[in-house]
Amino acid sequence: MAKIKEEIILECKRMYEEDHISCAQIAKHFGIGSATVRRRLKALGVEIIQHPHAGVFDTKEVLNLYKEGIPIWKIAKKFKSSEETISKVLKEQGVIVKKKLAFDEHIFDSIDTEEKAYWLGFIWADGCVVNSYVERKSCSVEIGISVKDFNHLEKFCEFIRLPKDRIHTRQIKETTVNGKLVNPGLSCRVQLSSKHMWNQLVNLGCCPNKTYNEIFPCLDIFKTPDLIHHFIRGFFDGDGWVYIDCQNHLITGICGQEQFLIELKKLLPVKLQNISLYKVANTEVIRVLKWAVDNSKIFLNYIYKDATIWLDRKFNISAPYISNSISKSVNIGETPEMDNTEITIETKESVAS
């Protein structure tokens, strides 16, 4: 039996716990057996949840809750199930289930505003379009982030017109990385069940189960070219970092799939286009764009140009280095804590130009 690399197992764990991707789908993604995935996840202390179906939980209780006016999503949350499963149970009991969307599923039909471009970029980084069953019988869009950025998810709810009580918070289980016990802390997420939004995001280029497979969207999806840097800022807020190092130097960077970063780099100010991509230790697919001091300032001024929405934690660090009117018009409060994102660079050789 071929040995599975530790980083693949840890990525399986992340996909299962954070992206809510099934063991079968994870197995298909990496070309390994689903039983192997389940076994290795259990060895890491991951609780494998068998998704409930009719007969596993009290059908009468489900019916009573629905008749009392409890929304399907709340019933699903109570039983740790999916909205699709609860709807199926109700339909099997002869209940006519009316689809009531609590959000705007057409919000990404046209990328014609700063907010749409920004949140599209954020979904590209920290979101997931999930195709739960064959033939797209269950399609959802999910965003999951650290609980320390909970207010950012509240901003997304306002944008999508989703009640804020749809945000789920949970403890991520401790895991061992390189022999050290790591406690990831709490995560928060929202899940949007909508085949229309799922199809729209896929059509825009957001790949289902996109880990290591993201592609840069076609520029034609943006109604005007000045929306592109808002998309990049959204991606940066999801998969980028900014901090002040021990020598008081400003450091910024973005990580992602190689071809994605190559396309992104072409859109940056000319001085930043010559920056090399770097390999990340222990992985063959993730690359890094990293800037320091002056180049970091150029990058930050580019992505924050005319911005009105951002991840507060990263903006608070960036604001003193932004020369346009944004930082002057916003009260950034106390000196922010350092962003603790750490990326280990394996080699300085360019992997793409």
Image: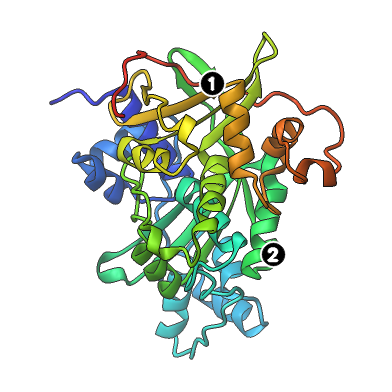
Indicate left or right for 247 with 259 as reference: right
Give the amino acid type for the residue marked by disc 2 in the picture.
Glu
Query: For the point 61% across and 23% down, which residue is it?
Result: 294
Query: For the point 65% across and 26% down, which residue is it?
Result: 339
Judge whether 96 appears above or below 323 on screen: below
Q: Are marks 1 and 2 in contact (CB under 8 Å)?
A: no
Viewer-side residue, 190 vs 56: 190
Could you tell me if residue 78 is visible in this image?
Answer: no
Query: For the point 83% across and 38% down, which residue is it?
Result: 332
Could you tell me if residue 244 is visible in this image?
Answer: yes
Judge whether 45 appears above or below 78 on screen: above
Label 1, label 2: how far apart the Cα atoms are: 31 Å
Judging from the image, what secondary structure is the residue with disc 1 in? Answer: loop
Which scheme is used to colour this image of the protein?
rainbow
Identify the residue under disc 2.
158
In the picture, which quadrant includes the N terminus? Answer: top left
Quadrant hosting residue 68? bottom right
Viewer-side residue, 329 vs 168: 329
Q: Residues within 10 Å of mark 2 (few under 14, many from 20)?
A: few
Q: Residues within 10 Å of mark 1 (few under 14, many from 20)?
A: few
Identify the residue under disc 1.
342
Indicate left or right for 6 with 267 as reference: left
- On the image, the x and y values in percent for residue 30 come to 24, 40
Mark positioned earlier in the residue sequence (1 or 2) = 2
Quadrant hosting residue 53? bottom left
Give the amino acid type for the residue marked by disc 1 in the picture.
Glu
